[in-house]
Image (cartoon, coloured by chain):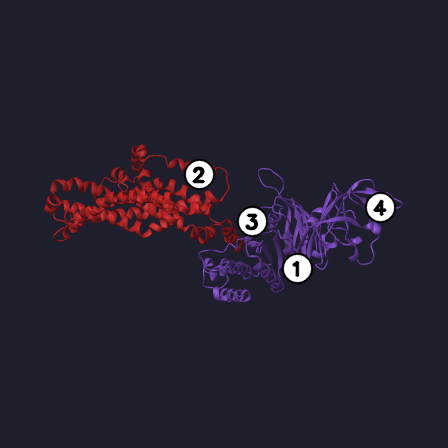
Amino acid sequence: MARVIFDGVGKKYAGGGANAVTDLNMEIADREFLVLVGPSGCGKSTAMRMVAGLEEITEGRIIIGDRVVNDLPPKDRDVAMVFQSYALYPHMSVRDNLAYPLKLRKVPKAEREQRVNEAARVLDITQFLDRKPKALSGGQRQRVALGRAIVRNADVFLMDEPLSNLDAKLRVQTRAELIKLHERVQTTIIYVTHDQVEAMTMGDRIAVMSLGVLQQLATPQELYDNPTNKFVAGFIGSPSMNFLDVQLQGSEGRLYAVTPGFKMRVPDTKGRALQPYIGQSVTLGVRPEHLVERSRLGGDAPPDATIPVTVDIVETLGNEIFVYLTSPGTVLTSRMAPDIQLTSGQQIEVAAEPERLHFFDPKTELKVA
Amino acid sequence: MSAEAIRPFDEARGAVPTVAAVGSGRRSWLFGGIAQTLLILWTLMVVFPFLWMIVSAFKSNPEIVFSPWQLPDTLQWGNFERAWTEAGIGRFAVNTLIVLAGSLTGTLVISAMAAYVLARFEFPGRQFIFYLFLAGTMFPVFLALVPLVFLVQDLRLFNTYQGLMLVYIAYSLPFTIFFLTGFMKTLPNEVGEAAVMDGAGPYRVFFDVMLPMAKPGIIAMGIFNFLGQWNQFLLPLVLMPNPDRHLLSQGLAALAIQQGYQNDYGALFAAMTITMVPTLVVYIIFQRRLEAGLTAGALKG
């Protein structure tokens, strides 16, 4: 059993400056694959390194299993780590690299060999066991780094951007292998990345961080459908969500989002939550894939719930097209099916289903509806 | 010491213009040509006395005096025999090897450990200690000579191998630590952290992981200090006056004076050849590693 609990964890570096991590609270279940994601400098690596014991915890507690590990040295935490640069021992053969953690734990030689061979078999690196790391390709080194974690049977695996040094194709392949590996070894994994695609595809749950603060901890689908704030909404999804500053106006019991270019009726389902914002500005967010040409909207959109726009640029990708749309004061991106015929300069109307519209408070950036 | 010890470094650097001159275009070809010509001249100037010394070591005394430019009629191996036994070069060589074995080991072990800590750990006074060592590189041996003699005498190490070893180590540490600190800083941090995660304590991290990774730098400093300490003359002269304990450099100096009276130039040249050969061999074998080690930091940074 190895759950990992962050209890009010903070990290302050000597010499002042902003906190690297502020009041982080989350519970990672046993055998969960948790992804820590965020832009560089958001504190995700620092949070992970505090679990590893490579960084001191300056506030709060970290609990692994049932032990508070704040004052435990790394070797007593039963945590294995895979580094971004792989960090293999360059002067040791692959076999010795894999055996090193076992040797330090005084595992008998016979068992050591057996575990190394087993890990090598799982990762398909048996034929490289007697090579030095420098004679391996990036993908092979990556496997050795994983192997060094696997042989230990540690309770918790930490992975610090392990795929970022691989080329695009290999990355996709290794991503799938890591998911399979997790099913097989059944350990708790904390995985750090700045790549939201990796986060979405691999994580049981995802913790989105920004400026040292946890923004949202949820399943990939929940993050996508229901982001708690503008940062999460913009970070998850590619191309990222469109944001528009709109004025909320009420007339005849209906709500309208108004910009210099259009006046769009706000779905009634959002009305209640938006009441306090009538007469003020809010941020309207809609994902590119949810912004469709009016006639394609399932059911029929009320005529005043659409946005009139001009087609600016059309990018064809084969299986889909990206359309850049302009309306006075705003630019919108839309992701549409490739069978639609659009030309630059064409006037169209776009709309989104009511539940696909997100409204954010412009000051706190929290989602209000 | 430091001025002598620096020399191989400068020689290594002397090779750089040819490398830099490799390139396209007429101009670089012209400069390359001039540089090559100058280097060939320089090489002749350096190599010729060496060759003359080696050739003379095989000549008889009259040959050296009356036909200095000719090759020997018969090889006079007896010169080497006399140099080794009668002139005591054999004994001096053993003395030198004993001192160097201790002083080189001491220098490298202490320097590697100190450099590792200075390069990798944050602690109060780190900068101060580092600059203190750096200042040591600027302190000429001559200034310390008299107090050094008293110090070594007070330690009852005058005329002993250990005394000379200690002084050699002390004088080699500043530059070696300075160099290795820079070298250690270029080593990837994550590998050390990986060892920590694998369960290694500070000593294990150093000996199992960081030290092997620092090997090119340590080898470079080993050769560098071997050359510097082998060529050391002043320190043994004042700290090892006992003729039984003379080192090669002292022995050779004494021999130069003595053989002048005995008119045994052949043995003198043979002695010089014996003295020079080990440094030459070490340098030729390890030349690539020395240069690679000396520039490794720059290339990685």
Same chain assignment for discs 4 and 2: no
Query: Are dots 4 and 2 in contact, CB under 8 Å?
Result: no
Q: Residue at x 47, y 62 (%)?
A: A95
- Which residue position is annotated with label 4? A255
- Asked where in the image residue A365 lies, by quadrant, the reply is top right
Q: Quadrant of the N terminus of chain A?
A: bottom right
Element class at badge 2: helix
Q: Amino acid at mark 2?
A: Phe
Q: Is residue B146 above or below residue A319?
A: above
Place of residue B55 in the rendered image (x, y in percent of width and height, measured from the top left):
18, 49
- Which residue position is annotated with label 2? B130
- Which residue position is annotated with label 1? A318
Real-space Cα distance between discs 4 and 1? 38 Å
Task: Tell whether A323 sits left or right of B278.
Answer: right
Task: Tell whether A11 sits left or right of B204.
Answer: right
Q: Colour of chain B?
A: red
- Which residue position is annotated with label 3? A54
Real-space Cα distance between discs 2 and 3? 25 Å
Query: Are dots 2 and 1 in contact, CB under 8 Å?
Result: no
Would you call the spot at circle 4 few (<14 residues within 10 Å), some (14-19), or many (20 or more)?
A: many
Place of residue B237 in the rendered image (x, y in percent of width and height, measured from the top left):
25, 38
Would you call the spot at circle 1 few (<14 residues within 10 Å), some (14-19), or many (20 or more)?
A: few
Disc with the residue nearer the chain's start (4 vs 1):
4
- Asked where in the image residue A280 lies, by quadrant, the reply is top right
